[in-house]
Image: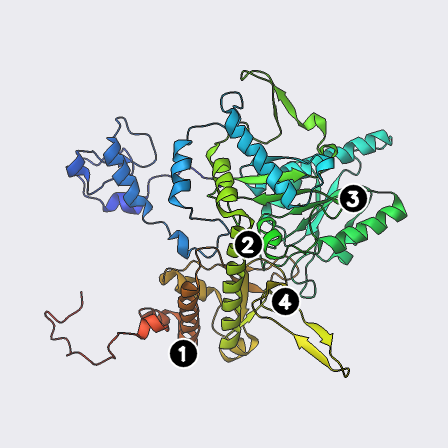
């Protein structure tokens, strides 16, 4: 959860309000237009009101305030899914009050939870003979902590059995410098040295397995390998990392496991590129996490972590509970948690099935390729993500002539990755307009309704800033067309303008078919006479 601080009354707003002769010292009040309609007094913002407000009035007041939030469908910065069918909404509301931890009172809900774990274990190729085990979490952040804790405890047990210290020099964990903050949180919160492997253009802006081995030693509890970097969407090479760790164990006897952070890729790779080996097919992968509320297509609040076998989840990390009416078992960072996100996840499994998830993933990737190509063809941008770049295959025909085969519709012909498009101003654009700052694109797109973040790459490449678009299920080809038009128009406006402020004058036009079709050309109407013809 984000931190929040206590806020003092805003001096400017307070002193600008209408006052009686005796000024109020009660602080900043929220005065609403509905006060007369509902008979409500001004509501204090930063302290609880002495008297409550009618439920209908409260709803209206909060509803109106929340309209100031961004539009979820236009938030291209987030991986989080924002839409489900109305039947799923209804099912969640019917179960909104259920607590997942109370297994005795809600046994069927627990059954659905178990089914979800089994579905994911099978999807990630866990052998049934190994008795995979897993649990729901609030999201991938919690799941990553649990995966790391299990690896740390196994390392501690192994060190104690060998008569070695678990404190000097202490445990460490290896990950790419592009790791999402949740991975670094594990290291900091649970006293594990975080060894960040620098990234490079050659490593596709994520973990370089060869370089990672320089950071591995006998105190390494494991390696976090990310299936889908949040920066560029690249999959880190799980299989290559595992092979190097296999060789390392043969030389040293040190067993270093892999936890795959599949927060996004865990729901893309199995459906879009099922032949790609990254999961429990690789013996060194001991645990995998994913976010149901990302490409699992559920609302925010559900993640998953699965271990390939019970032996990789130490028994002393599992708590046996006796006070809720039966014997129950728990391994999580928090106790109570809502059951409806798990129910929503199971709804998706049943509603979509493998074919439905595959269709969504393929469409997301297709739209991401469309955006990538359009941005590159504009000449204004270089695309750092690679999901639109082909993996060339060739065959030899009679006569010895080599023919390149390429089917643009076949996702297997492209570099695998997330439907993420990371891009930046091209060298040509920067040379022509050196005064233009890329971060202005983010601001001007926000004025058009789009939320497209601009931020620095990970350490060693922090001088490179990128813009990033996450293509989700509700990011249609029509929206991509409009987005491309707006991005190009902003880039051209910044280049043509003497200063970035003047580019605002061009925000009202759109370089898309919808922006032109049916619109009269400039000068088609009479000039304003200062009265009725003047625009409001």
Which residue is drawn at the image coordinates 20% and 80% (left, top)? 524
For marks 2 and 3, give the CA distance.
33 Å
Mark 4 near mark 1, Cβ–Cβ under 8 Å?
Answer: no
* Residue 256: numbered disc: 3
Q: Give the CA distance from mark 3 to mark 4.
A: 33 Å
Categorize mark 4 by other alpha carbons within 10 Å: few (<14), some (14-19), many (20+).
some
| Labels 2 and 3: the sequence-earlier one | 3
Q: How many labels does the image show?
A: 4
Question: Residue 47 placed where, x, y %?
Answer: 33, 32
The residue depicted at 40 percent of the width and 69 percent of the height is: 486
Q: Quick check: can you spot residue 404?
A: yes
Crowding at dot 1, Cα within 10 Å, few <14 / some 14-19 / many 20+, comes out as few
Of badges 4 and 1, the one in the foreground is 4
Say which mark, if any, is on residue 496: 1
Of tags 1 and 3, the one toward the viewer is 3
Rendering coords of residue 228 (x, y %): 61, 54
Label 3 vs label 4, nearer the camera: 4
Instruction: Relative to 212, say whether 34 is above or below.
Output: above
Q: Kindly identify which residue carries mark 2.
A: 358
For the residue labelled by badge 2, is the local secondary structure a helix, a strand or a loop?
A: helix
The numbered mark, 1 or 3, whose residue comes first in the sequence reads: 3
Q: Nearer the viewer, mark 2 or mark 3?
A: 2
The answer to which quarter of the image holds residue 411 is bottom right
Q: Earlier in the sequence, mark 3 or mark 4?
A: 3
């Amino acid at each position: 959860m984000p931190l929040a601080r206590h806020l003092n009354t805003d001096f400017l707003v307070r002193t600008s309000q209408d006052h009686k002769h005796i000024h109020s010292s009660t602080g900043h009040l929220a005065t609403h237009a509905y006060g007369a309609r509902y008979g409500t007094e001004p509501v204090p913002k930063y302290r609880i009101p002495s008297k409550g407000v009618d439920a209908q009035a409260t709803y209206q007041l909060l509803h109106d305030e929340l309209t100031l939030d961004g539009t979820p469908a236009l938030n291209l910065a987030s991986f989080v899914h924002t839409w489900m069918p109305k039947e799923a909404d209804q099912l969640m509301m019917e179960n909104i009050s259920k607590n997942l931890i109370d297994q005795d009172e809600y046994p069927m809900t627990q059954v659905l939870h178990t089914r979800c774990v089994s579905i994911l274990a099978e999807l990630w190729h866990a052998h049934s003979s190994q008795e995979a085990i897993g649990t729901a979490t609030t999201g991938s952040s919690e799941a990553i902590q649990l995966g790391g804790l299990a690896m740390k405890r196994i390392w501690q047990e192994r060190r104690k059995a060998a008569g070695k210290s678990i404190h000097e020099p202490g445990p460490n964990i290896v990950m790419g410098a592009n790791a999402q903050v949740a991975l670094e949180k594990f290291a900091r919160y649970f006293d594990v040295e975080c060894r960040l492997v620098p990234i490079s253009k050659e490593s596709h802006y994520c973990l370089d397995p060869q370089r990672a081995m320089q950071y591995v030693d006998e105190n390494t509890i494991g390696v976090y390998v990310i299936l889908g970097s949040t920066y560029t969407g690249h999959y880190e090479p799980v299989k290559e990392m595992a092979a190097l760790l296999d060789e390392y164990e043969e030389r040293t006897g040190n067993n270093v496991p892999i936890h795959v952070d599949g927060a996004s890729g865990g729901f893309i790779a199995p459906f879009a590129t099922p032949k790609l080996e990254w999961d429990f097919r690789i013996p060194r992968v001991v645990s995998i996490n994913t976010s149901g509320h990302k490409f699992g297509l559920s609302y925010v609040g559900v993640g998953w972590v699965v271990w390939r076998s019970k032996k990789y989840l130490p028994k002393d990390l599992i708590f046996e509970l006796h006070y809720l009416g039966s014997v129950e078992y728990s391994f999580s960072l928090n106790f109570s948690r809502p059951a409806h996100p798990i129910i929503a996840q199971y709804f998706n499994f049943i509603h979509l099935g493998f074919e439905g998830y595959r269709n969504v993933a393929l469409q997301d990737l297709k739209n991401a390729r469309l955006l990538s190509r359009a941005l590159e063809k504009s000449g204004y941008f270089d695309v750092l993500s690679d999901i639109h770049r082909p993996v060339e295959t060739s065959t030899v025909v009679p006569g010895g002539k080599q023919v390149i085969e390429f089917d643009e519709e076949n996702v297997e012909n492209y570099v695998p990755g997330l439907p993420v498009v990371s891009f930046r101003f091209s060298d040509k654009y920067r040379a022509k307009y050196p005064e233009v700052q890329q971060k202005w694109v983010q601001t001007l797109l926000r004025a058009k309704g789009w939320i497209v973040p601009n931020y620095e790459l990970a350490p060693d490449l922090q001088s490179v800033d990128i813009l990033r678009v996450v293509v989700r299920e509700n990011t249609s080809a029509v929206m991509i067309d409009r987005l491309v038009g707006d991005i190009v128009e902003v880039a051209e406006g910044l280049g043509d303008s003497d200063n970035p402020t003047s580019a605002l004058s061009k925000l009202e036009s759109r370089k898309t078919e919808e922006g032109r079709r049916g619109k009269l050309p400039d000068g088609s109407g009479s000039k304003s006479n200062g009265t009725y013809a003047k625009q409001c």
